[in-house]
Amino acid sequence: MKSIEPACIQQLLDQLKGQEVYIHLEMTTGAYAAHRGEAKLAATAFITNATVTYSQGLIAGDGPYRVGLKTAHGWVFAQGLTHWDETETTRLIAAGHDPDGKLVVALQIAQEPFSSHEED
Amino acid sequence: MDPKQILVVLAHPDDEGIIGGTLMEHAQQGAKITYICLTLGEMGRNMGKPPFATRVSLPKIRRQELKEACQLIGIQDVREFGLHDKMVEFEDQEAVADRVLEVIEEVKPDLIYTFYPGHGVHPDHDACGAITIRAVAKLPADKRPVTRCIAMTPGSYAVLGQPDFVNDVSDIVDLKIQAIGAHKTQFQLMLGNYSQETKDRHRHERLWVYRF
């Protein structure tokens, strides 16, 4: 994980544009947020391996960053992105981490579905 | 009670740390421990500080952390059920209960550890407890292993009464905390400044026996 370099993210967004891609989009306060009193409401939403095709994908901001993907009938949006996996050359793996390193938001785009239980 | 075979059914890698001291004692006394871990905790928020895991690498990292923690505790047999983190309650409950029952029939435990349904705080914990209770309830009453449950809700004493089993694990608390710390992505933050307070919190493990 590295701090986001916007030019590198933009290059991946361009590379993945105009084709059906798999998206993981997530935002979470953590399941224990209310239990530990960090927030009044524990809330999470994610969609994993949704397929979309976007005609334009841009990264914006000075950090933390925003990404918007324009689809035929709407948008995909993530705000608060701070880190990315710099070892990925064909997929975008980006997330926003709070000062404790906890993940708050994630945006991932790939040509193949993401698998959470693949064997090592 | 001197259990020979124990079955642990929990939801996420690192849940075993809650009863780590008790499990260590069982292992030291020669019990064989089988641990069904329903998910890989791949939707966890803690990614190391500074973050070193991604959503993609987290399940692999947590599998490795689980292996290390289990070695430290003395759990020899880990069964990954491969369910998706946070989605346990949305699976076919009967089907998962049948999978748990298969393992019960295979390893024939004389003692089971799981979450107390409704007292797990995390929805996966509650579903995990309910599934395990459902599996055990399928056995004839006289064949059901004693099932000890972890309760985490603040109101658990008011609803469930005093725990049936309070285990003081002070003499092995350092090793227990080491096993918890094996989950580096999860506990770097919590155990980072390993304090007396951390130690005190982990000295006692409380369990409620489920009444079928």
Image (cartoon, helix red, strand yellow):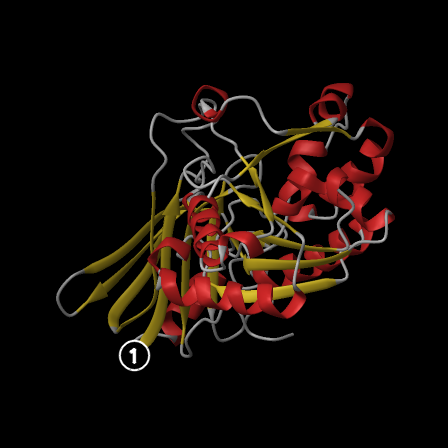
Residue A109 sits in quarter: bottom left
| Farthest-out residue, front | B142
Q: Residue at x 37, y 47 (%)?
A: A27
Asked if A119 appears above or below A83 in the picture, the reply is below
Report if residue A3 is visible in the image. no
Q: Position of residue B176 (x, y in %)?
A: 78, 39
Left or right of B179, for residue B80: left
Q: How many marks?
A: 1
Q: Is residue B126 left or right of residue A46?
A: right
Q: Amino acid at mark 1?
A: Glu
Q: Residue at x 68, y 63 (%)?
A: B78
Q: Is residue A80 above or below residue A20?
A: above
Query: Where residue B56 sits: x, y (%)?
Result: 53, 64
**Disc 1 crowd, CA 10 A, few/some/many (<14, 14-19, 20+):** some
SS category of the residue bearing label 1: loop
Instruction: Tell me residue B59's x, y (percent).
Output: 58, 61
In the rendered image, which quarter contains the N terminus of chain B? top right
Residue B48 percent coordinates (x, y) = 63, 45
Which of the pair B110/B9 is nearer the observer? B110
Q: Which residue matches tag 1?
A: A20
Q: Give the letter of the chain under mark 1.
A: A
What is the quadrant of residue B20 in the picture?
A: top right
Answer with left or right where residue B50 lies relative to residue B127.
Answer: right
Q: Considering depth in this image, is B40 or A56 the residue closer to the camera? A: B40
Res B47 visible: yes
In this picture, residue B206 sits left or right of residue A41: right
